[in-house]
């Protein structure tokens, strides 16, 4: 989020100081994480010159599937072609966060208005009516105070800016953790699309394709609250789980695996004076539906336009309250509500409810008008339109 915001601000003529604790040597060593980029997000990347850098590194995926694992059948196929009149990008781009960071960093490094400080730790801030001062420390522990007009906390779920603002991070944490296994295996030969949501009362899953090398598919599985993390991530346990998912009789080539905790939380304030939150610092949600990174990018562009207007003297600070009203509404009414619903749908245990949900999905996918409405919501275009209407 920090990179998108900085690029949008700098391209609007606003000088930015971007603080990042990681350095060139370890920035790309992170878990790839988010990777499904929705159409409206692609439009935003295009605005800052990022889309053309990402497209060759990603997979264009117009269609996504819902599967019933219990009955081994495809429930519904949704095609973004129904959004052809709503967006210039009627597809998602499967391109992981780490590639987005790498490409955006190239653009940030060459922009004369971006003062990029890698290997720099943000440690706190103080503000008055006119200025805000951020405290940062270099790897040797030497401290520096950086003065500016605004401070935007884009430092993820554990945001220090949020803690120092004294805002609450309201919501809950799922008791079960999600297991993510990346395998080099082409699931398309079994009829899967590049992006699949798979319902099963015993073990729901998600299956996504990423461009290599090596070409990889990420499979998400739920785990039980009492599971021993070490035992369930042993290679033989991962292989057994994958064979239960798809019995090939041969070991899968496992590229990576990790276990993560899923939170559904939204900050009760996105702004206190000159300190503002965006992205995971402001809201976190389950990855089912690919909304975390996307809604964070949408925060960044909404905020960039408002900060540019304020700093050019074209708007007052009160537009930042509108930012909070718009983006907090989206976090609560769209990202949270939809991701909670998505998980419930995939994990539903009642056979009658499952049948009803699946029939409803199938009918929606088959009717072009209803499919478009569904896709407007799932791709967050509806959330942006709704936010635009908030005064
Ligand atoms: C396994 C997994 C899969 C996911 N899949 C999806 C998906 O398919 N689609 C989707 O939309 N979302 C997905 N998400 C969520 C998505 O990754 C996040 O929403 C997104 O990365 C948030 O971006 P951010 O910039 O707000 O925070 P982050 O990506 O967490 O970035 C924060 C940055 O701030 C830096 N930082 C932190 N603290 C400090 C400090 N004190 N000083 C200096 N720098 C600091 C960090 O090093 C980091 O570079 C997934 C998440 C996980 C865990």
Image (spheres, helix red, strand yellow):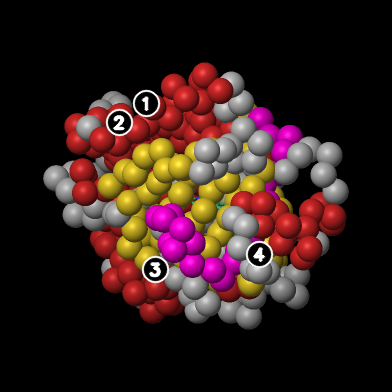
Determine whether the residue tagged by mark 3 lies in a helix, strand or loop: loop
**Residue 140 placement (x, y as % from top left):** 75, 75
Q: Is residue 225 magenta?
A: no
Marks 2 & 1, CB-CB < 8 Å contact: yes
**Residue 346 placement (x, y as % from top left):** 54, 35
Question: Quick one: label 4 or label 2, which is nearer the N terminus?
Answer: 4
Label 3 to label 4, Cα distance in Å?
Answer: 30 Å
Question: Quick one: label 2 or label 3, which is nearer the N terminus?
Answer: 3
Residue 230 vertical placement versus 352 (above, below): below
Residue numbers of the magenta segment: 172-193
In screen coordinates, is 173 left or right of 378? right
Number of the label disc, if any, that sits on residue 58: 3
Question: Of tags 4 and 2, which is closer to the observer?
Answer: 4
**Residue 184 placement (x, y as % from top left):** 56, 71
Q: What residue appears at the point 53 percent right and 48 percent down from the top-left corner?
A: 206
Question: Of tags 3 and 4, which is closer to the observer?
Answer: 4
| Label 2 packing within 10 angstroms: few (<14), some (14-19), many (20+) | some
Marks 3 & 4, CB-CB < 8 Å contact: no
In screen coordinates, is 315 left or right of 317? left
**Residue 167 placement (x, y as % from top left):** 62, 33
Number of the label disc, if any, that sits on residue 249: 4
Question: Of tags 4 and 1, which is closer to the observer?
Answer: 4
Question: Quick one: label 3 or label 1, which is nearer the N terminus?
Answer: 3
Marks 4 & 2, CB-CB < 8 Å contact: no
Marks 2 & 3, CB-CB < 8 Å contact: no
Q: What residue appears at the point 61 percent right and 26 percent down from the top-left corner?
A: 349
């Amino acid at each position: 989020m920090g990179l998108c915001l900085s690029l949008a601000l700098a391209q609007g003529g606003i000088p930015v100081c971007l603080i990042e604790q990681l350095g060139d040597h370890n920035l790309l060593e992170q878990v790839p994480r988010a990777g499904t980029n929705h159409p409206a997000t692609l439009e935003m990347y295009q605005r800052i010159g990022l889309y053309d850098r990402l497209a060759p590194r990603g997979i264009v995926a117009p269609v996504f599937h819902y599967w019933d694992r219990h009955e081994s059948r495809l429930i519904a196929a949704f095609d973004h072609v129904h959004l052809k009149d709503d967006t210039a990008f009627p597809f998602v781009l499967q391109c992981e966060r780490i590639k987005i960071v790498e490409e955006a960093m190239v653009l940030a490094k060459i922009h004369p208005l971006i003062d990029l400080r890698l290997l720099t730790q943000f440690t706190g801030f103080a503000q008055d009516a006119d200025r805000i001062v951020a405290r940062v420390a270099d790897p040797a522990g030497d401290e520096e105070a950086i003065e500016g007009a605004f401070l935007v906390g884009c430092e993820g779920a554990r945001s220090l800016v949020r803690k120092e603002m004294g805002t609450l991070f309201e919501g809950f944490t799922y008791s079960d953790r999600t297991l993510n296994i990346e395998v080099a295996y082409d699931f398309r030969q079994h009829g899967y699309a590049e992006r699949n949501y798979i319902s099963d009362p015993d073990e729901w899953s998600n299956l996504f394709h990423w461009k290599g090398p090596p070409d990889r598919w990420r499979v998400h599985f739920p785990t039980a609250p009492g599971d021993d993390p070490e035992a369930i991530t042993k290679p033989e346990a991962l292989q057994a789980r994958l064979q239960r998912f798809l019995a090939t009789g041969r070991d899968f080539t496992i590229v990576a695996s990790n276990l993560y905790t899923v939170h559904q939380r939204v900050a009760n304030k996105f702004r206190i004076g000159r300190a503002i939150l965006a992205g995971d610092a402001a809201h976190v949600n389950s990855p089912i539906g690919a909304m975390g990174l996307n809604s964070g990018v949408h925060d960044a562009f909404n905020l960039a336009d408002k900060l540019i207007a304020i700093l050019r003297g074209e708007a007052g600070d009160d537009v930042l309250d509108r930012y909070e009203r718009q983006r907090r509404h989206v976090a609560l009414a769209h990202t949270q509500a939809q991701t909670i619903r998505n998980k419930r749908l995939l994990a539903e245990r009642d056979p009658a409810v499952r049948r009803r949900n699946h029939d409803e999905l199938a009918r929606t996918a088959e009717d072009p008008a209803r499919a478009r409405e569904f896709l407007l919501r799932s791709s967050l275009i509806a959330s942006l339109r709704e936010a635009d209407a908030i005064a």
